[in-house]
Amino acid sequence: MEEPTGFLVQHMAAHIAVMNIAAPFLVILTRWVAAVRSNPARARWIGPATVIQIALLWGWHLPAPLAFAYTVPGALALMHVSLFAAALWFWWTVLEEAEAARRRALGALLVTGKLFCLLGVLLTFAPRALFARAAELCLGTGTAVGTLLQDQQLAGLLMLAACPLTYVLAGVVIAARWLGDIERRRASLVADSSV
């Protein structure tokens, strides 16, 4: 039995590291170091930022665009840069929205997390290797289809395990802050009414 190629697992691991770890960390660090204050005018971009990030992730991971990324010089770099830029914009607007209207930030995290998971489910449970052409371009001819299917399934499982953690963690932090603010306002109202 041949060993899995690891082609897609490495590909997905790179995207997860960049989009779900590096981008939110960089945004949080930038906001903290620069002491950026929330700006409700910037928060209104959460819808477009969410749509762009999802469209780019799904668009680049269709079989033809992925094969294109591995065929055309510079296209793979374009894929990684565009996904990273979209993730930076998404996480920036989520943090802006977390200060302005937390329900929209939670909604964006929920939608994005679910659609990332759906891509992971499709990769995991697809009955055949979806990226045979991209793998052939990346690894050369002669790679067993069964090996590619195992690699694809592992990549999907990696997405299912890693991606939701980022969105759930961010959602828990935002919801906890929201509930803390509600509790402080309620305590303040109770204190004011007892005076």
Image (cartoon, rainbow, N blue to C red):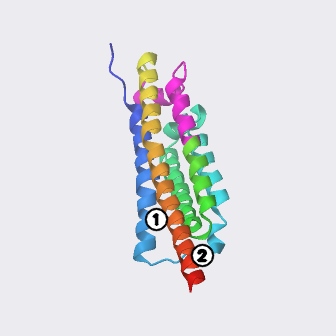
| Mark drawn on residue 190 | none
The amino acid pointed to by label 2 is Asn
Whether 149 is drawn above or below 165: the answer is: above
Residue that extends furthest to the bottom in the rendered view of this protein: 195
Q: Is residue 18 magenta?
A: no
Q: Is residue 54 above or below residue 133?
A: below
Q: CA distance from mark 2 to mark 1?
A: 15 Å
- Quadrant position of residue 60: top right
Q: Position of residue 1 (x, y in %)?
A: 32, 12
Q: Which residue is mark 1?
A: 27
Front residue of 130/180: it is 180
| Residue pictured at 46% horizontal, 17% vertical | 145
Q: In the image, 31: left or right of 182? A: left
Q: Main secondary structure of the magenta part?
A: helix
Give the mark toward the camera: 2 or 1. 2
Q: Nearer the viewer, residue 111 or 80?
A: 111
Give the crowd class for mark 2: few <14, some 14-19, many >=20 residues within 10 Å. Answer: few
Q: Position of residue 143 (x, y in %)?
A: 41, 20
Position of the C terminus, as image quadrant, is bottom right
Quadrant of the rendered image containing residue 63: top right
For numbered disc 2, what is the local secondary structure?
loop
The magenta span reads 115-140
On the image, numbered disc 2 is attached to which residue? 39
Q: Position of residue 74 (x, y in %)?
A: 49, 48
User: At numbered mark 1, what does the secondary structure look like: helix, strand or loop?
Assistant: helix
Inspect this view and state whether residue 17 appears.
Answer: yes
**Residue drawn 53% across the image and 63% down it:** 179
The outermost residue toward the top is 1
Sequence-wise, the earlier of marks 2 and 1 is 1
Magenta span contains residue 119: yes
Report the front residue among 108 and 81: 108
Residue at screen point 62% across, 66% down = 101
